[in-house]
């Protein structure tokens, strides 16, 4: 798992040690990042200033089923004592009081269909950056970005860290190609270390967004069942019932 941190403060945990990496100095940006910075830096810096607040959202981006599965895990997990962070269940959701926003990527083909070499590797890296751009939407208030699809991790995660660094967006970026890494544990510890928990006493709230193809590929839209491609295997409510119910109940709340 990789993070946008100057120091990796819990690399000592054996479970996570194989998932922690540092982006090398002098990282070579992809052309998309260079264009965004060259053409829209003031606007991007303005968006970056609205991120990182404890009242903001944990934003997930990636293939729909990956996002939904991760949202369900974050909604339901109880692995830590919420008072002292011991790895002991306490009967309360670990992400109590948090808002979990899933940006379902319907704009791109299944990531596994894209090779991790050559031009297709660049396509995956660009998908990751466009996902980060979507997470900057001012209505989301992103305080953590999780790339939920392992296929985006090779290089794509570092591209997001590089992009965020160039625009002054100081939020944790979490990603891994290793499916054995526990995203729930890493997210919990990152939020606690950064003091980014809301500390509200309430059940987690889920919200669903979506990105579609064409000119709006980096603009998140409120999830609409009627716009889901016919190729999507089943309804969101089947794959992620807790997420879907929470979204329906809260989608019109500020």
Image: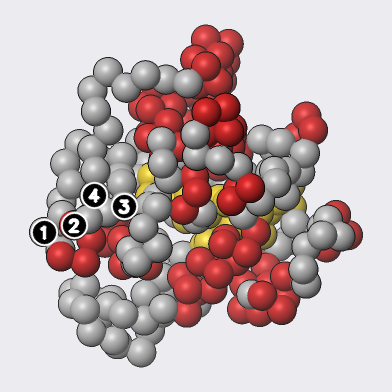
Q: Which residue is mark 1?
A: 12
* 50 displayed left or right of 168: right
Question: Which marked residue is nearer to the observer: mark 2 or mark 1?
Answer: 2
Mark 1–mark 3 distance (CA, rounded to whole Å): 13 Å
* Residues under numbered marks 2 and 1 in contact, where contact means CB atoms less than 8 Å apart: yes
Q: Which residue is mark 4?
A: 20
Mark 1–mark 4 distance (CA, rounded to whole Å): 10 Å
- Residue 19: quarter of image: bottom left
Against 74, residue 153 (above or below) is above
Total number of numbered labels?
4
Against 205, residue 149 (above or below) is above
Q: Secondary structure at mark 4?
A: loop
* Residues under numbered marks 3 and 2 in contact, where contact means CB atoms less than 8 Å apart: no
Mark 2–mark 1 distance (CA, rounded to whole Å): 6 Å
The earlier-in-sequence mark between 3 and 4 is 3
Mark 3–mark 4 distance (CA, rounded to whole Å): 5 Å
Q: Residue at x 83, y 56 (%)?
A: 229
Q: Residue at x 55, y 69 (%)?
A: 69
Which labelled disc corresponds to residue 1?
3
* Residues under numbered marks 2 and 4 in contact, where contact means CB atoms less than 8 Å apart: yes
Q: Residue at x 75, y 57 (%)?
A: 223
Q: Dot 3: within a 10 Å radius of its alpha carbon, few (fewer than 14), some, or many (20 or more) residues?
A: many
Q: Secondary structure at mark 1?
A: loop
Mark 2–mark 4 distance (CA, rounded to whole Å): 6 Å
Mark 3–mark 2 distance (CA, rounded to whole Å): 8 Å
The earlier-in-sequence mark between 2 and 1 is 1
Q: Picture coordinates of residue 75 (x, y %)? A: 50, 74
């Amino acid at each position: 798992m990789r993070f946008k941190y100057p120091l990796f403060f819990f690399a000592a945990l054996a479970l996570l040690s194989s998932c922690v990496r540092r982006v090398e100095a002098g990282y070579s940006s992809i052309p998309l990042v260079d264009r965004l910075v060259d053409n829209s830096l003031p606007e991007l810096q303005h968006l970056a200033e609205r991120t990182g607040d404890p009242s903001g959202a944990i934003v997930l981006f990636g293939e729909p089923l990956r996002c939904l599965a991760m949202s369900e895990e974050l909604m339901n997990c109880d692995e830590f004592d919420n008072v002292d962070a011991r790895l002991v269940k306490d009967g309360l959701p670990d992400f109590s009081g948090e808002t979990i926003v899933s940006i379902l990527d319907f704009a791109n083909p299944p990531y596994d269909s894209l090779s991790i070499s050559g031009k297709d590797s660049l396509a995956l890296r660009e998908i990751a950056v466009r996902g980060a751009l979507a997470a900057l939407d001012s209505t989301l208030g992103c305080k953590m970005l999780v790339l939920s699809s392992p296929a985006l991790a090779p290089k794509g995660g570092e591209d997001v860290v590089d992009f965020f660094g160039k625009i002054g967006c100081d939020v944790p970026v979490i990603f891994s190609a290793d499916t054995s890494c526990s995203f729930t544990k890493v997210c919990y510890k990152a939020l606690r270390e950064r003091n980014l928990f809301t500390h509200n006493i309430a059940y987690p709230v889920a919200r669903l967004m979506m990105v579609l193809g064409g000119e709006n590929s980096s603009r998140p839209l409120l999830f609409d069942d009627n716009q889901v491609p016919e190729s999507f295997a089943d309804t969101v409510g089947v794959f992620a019932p807790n997420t879907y119910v929470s979204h329906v109940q809260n989608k019109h709340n500020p």
